[in-house]
Amino acid sequence: MTAEPTGIPVLILKEGTQRTTGRDALRSNLLAARAIAEMIKTTYGPKGMDKMLVDALGDVTITNDGATILDKAEIQHPAAKMLVQVAKSQDSEVGDGTKRAVIFAGELLRYAEELLDKNIHPTVIISGYRIAMEEALKVLDQIAEPIDINSEELLKKVARTSLTSKAVHDAREFFADIAVKAVKQVVEKRGDKYYVDLDNIQIIKKYGGALLDSMLVYGIVLDKEVVHPGMPRRVENARIVLLDAPLEIEKPEIDAEIRINDPEQLEKFLQQEEDILVKMVDKIASVGANVVVCQKGIDEVAQHFLAKKGILAVRRVKRSDLEKLERATGGRIVSNIEDLTPEDLGYAALVEERKIGEDKMVFIEGCKNPRSVSIVIRGGLERLVDEAERSMRDALSAVADALRDGKIIPGGGATEIELAKYIRRLATKIGGKEQLAIEAFAKAIEGLTVSLIENAGLDPIDMIMKLRAAHEKDSGKYLSIDLATGDLVNMKEKGVIEPVSILANAIKAGTEAATIILRIDDVIAASKLEKGKEETGKKPGEEEKEKED
């Protein structure tokens, strides 16, 4: 609402619309975003705690994975939702470091609030933050060190660093080994760059057993069972047909009516159907196949004839699993059985049905050079298996990022302190009000290390002073705090390393989120729909009028 010089009010927004302007709007957004960052902060680092999330149906999720917490928590505030999007973008881009991106955005907004209280305009703060971000990314590239991608030990350290803060902490050596082997198996070299598609790594969860019962399968595991009791349950030196056509008589696309007035005609009709199925099975057997994996259905008659020929068959397999099998076994997906040739067959040393927990599964393993592999995750508790899967995905992403980047940085908060040192030096050169914003950026980056220290129950002021002094020396860039003892340790020597893209992406995403929130000075919220109107699309009064008509 606004007012004319005559004092007559003029309505410019719909009735019921709420409008918050100026500092009130900015402060509300800052508080909401910071509340999200504070919620995530306690889960950060090896000493971080877990969150229990209960949805409307009563389903429980226990996790300390940032992306999962923000995805499961039903956040309403529009500014807070921006930090949820930051976590999602970080998760989709690099697969790890979601908490870091959100906490960093929260720290930037916290120090921005202090600058706003000193009457520094938001655009000055944004300008300073952007200058500092560019400097941070430049320094990060200089700090990063190239890696030998053939060094499994180095890649295991990257995976282990990613798993340190997870629920699978006790099994991290075992999980890191699986993650490295799986990624190394599916990595491709394109030009002078390495490319990893994590979709080629299948993860199957089955609770029961222990975390150490988890396994890497050099092939694919199908969550299906063999279709016929007369079929073999184990086939060695398997030659596999990958079918996306049904092994059954398909119904015609248009309705058809067949009139039969003689029992012999009916017998011939059924015999004809059987002959078609026998012909299909004979074709499969003639190319030398002894395993059939079918995306669609397999008729009971076809199952019988396949069993007679000693062919193992699995049906209703997901298309994505069929494509993984194509990459793993070296076979080709066939859409028409008539076109099947021996060259289309895939190979595996062993195809076997096994019982895992309460379910039967078909293991296709021992492929010659599988470009797709499977990880079966076990655990004594369903919630633990879910969390182990999230942890494994983070470890796989970290190893894949290390291969893609070809560069690593020391973890454990060492790099953040080093970046803060360079950004403070830049601030003194810039001068003016922007200097304050650049210094705030340095404190926000240090805030990531402070969160690690606080979650370990150590004194943050004492530890940060100790770290700043150590990093002023040229040899101090690898130093951070051992969270168990409170002593300064060399993170590189301790094996705490991570891909450069995780921190780089977190800095970019966190800065962008903070600057977007700082630019908002007006929040116009439409009135919420009434319940009756929301369900029917009409006002309750309109509904009654229609009934009367």
Image (cartoon, grey):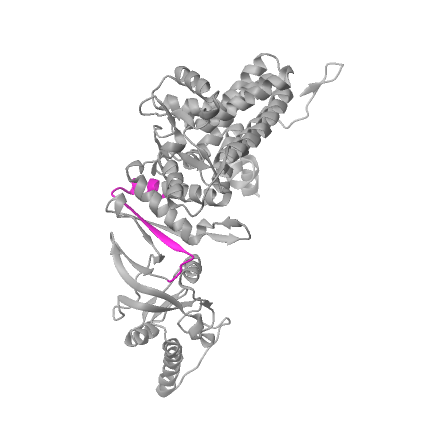
Can residue 249 be seen here? The reply is: yes
In the displayed structure, would residue 319 be above or below residue 532?
A: below
| Left or right relative to 151: residue 120 | right
Q: Residue at (37%, 43%) from the top-left corner? A: 153
Q: Where is residue 325 in the image (x, y as percent from the top left)?
A: 41, 61
Q: Which residue is drawn at the image coordinates 45% and 67% (left, top)?
A: 332
Q: Is-magenta flag for residue 543?
A: no
Q: Is residue 270 above or below residue 314?
A: below
Q: In this view, does 413 lie above or below 190?
A: above
- Look at the image and tell me in which quarter the N terminus lies: top right
Residue 197 vs residue 211: left or right? Answer: right
In the image as oriented, which residue stretches furthest toward the right?
Answer: 5
In the image shown, does 484 or 81 lie closer to the viewer?
A: 484
Closer-to-camera residue (527/163): 163
Magenta span includes 379: yes
Quadrant, the C terminus: top right
Q: Which residue is drawn at 38% across and 29% down?
A: 43
Q: In this view, does 440 lie above or below 325?
A: above
Residue 494, x across and y down, in percent: 36, 32
Task: Kindly indicate the quadrant of the structure image that contains residue 165.
Answer: top left
Q: Can residue 521 be seen in this view?
A: no
- Give the x, y percent position of residue 167: 32, 36
Which region shows up in magenta? 368-389
The residue positioned farthest toward the top in the image shown: 118
Q: Position of residue 77 (x, y in %)?
A: 51, 28
Q: Which residue is drawn at 51% across and 23% down?
A: 420
